[in-house]
Image: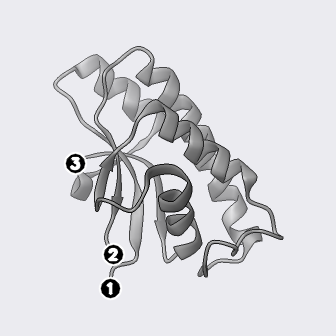
């Protein structure tokens, strides 16, 4: 059983766009794209994204602007009290909080870029 899931923006043939993406996000060779967020063993986050944001129909799911908004709201909604409502997590909330904040910030930056450029943004799940 895999443990990885996250959000990636594929590279493009547009050098200006690739430079812009590189300013905001980390490039991951194995994904051939820029990582917006990544979780390993956070079954609660995975389950919540599927349940609340994209449904359970695919291993790789291209994300719409509305789904990105939903995932952003999800990350901002987590508290110590509701952290594991969607399932177990390898991290305590206090360990996850800085990542959730960073990933919410990444999603916000992604939306700004998406308003200007057509991007291939997708959620992947290795389960």
The residue tagged 2 is 127
Rounded to the nearest angstrom, the CA distance separating label 1 from label 2 is: 6 Å
Disc 1 secondary structure class = loop
Where residue 95 appears, x then y in whole percent?
70, 70
Quarter of the image with the C terminus is bottom left
Q: For the view shown, which residue lies furthest in the top direction?
A: 116
User: Callout 2: few (<14), some (14-19), or many (20+) C-alpha neighbours within 10 Å?
Assistant: few
The residue tagged 1 is 1
Q: Residue at x 58, y 72 (%)?
A: 44
User: In the displayed structure, does residue 122 sit left or right of residue 114?
Assistant: left
The residue tagged 3 is 32
Q: For the view shown, which residue lies furthest in the bottom direction?
A: 1
Rounded to the nearest angstrom, the CA distance separating label 1 from label 3 is: 23 Å
If you read the primary sequence from the N terminus, does the residue marked by circle 1 or circle 2 appear first?
A: 1
CB atoms of marks 1 and 2 within 8 Å? yes
Where residue 88 appears, x then y in whole percent?
61, 82
> Which callout, 3 or 2, points to the residue nearer the camera?
2
Q: Residue at x 32, y 60 (%)?
A: 57
| Image quadrant where residue 93 sits | bottom right
Disc 3 secondary structure class = loop
């Amino acid at each position: 059983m895999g443990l990885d899931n996250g959000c990636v923006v594929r590279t493009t043939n547009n050098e200006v766009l690739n430079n812009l993406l590189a300013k905001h996000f980390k490039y991951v060779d194995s994904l051939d794209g820029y990582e917006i967020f990544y979780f390993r063993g956070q079954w609660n986050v995975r389950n919540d994204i599927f349940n609340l944001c994209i449904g359970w129909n695919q291993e790789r799911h291209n994300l719409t602007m509305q789904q990105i908004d939903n995932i952003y709201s999800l990350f901002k909604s987590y508290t110590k009290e509701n952290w594991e409502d969607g399932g177990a997590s390898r991290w305590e909330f206090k360990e996850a909080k800085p990542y959730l904040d960073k990933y919410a910030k990444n999603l916000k930056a992604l939306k700004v870029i998406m308003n200007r450029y057509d991007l291939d943004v997708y959620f992947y799940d290795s389960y």
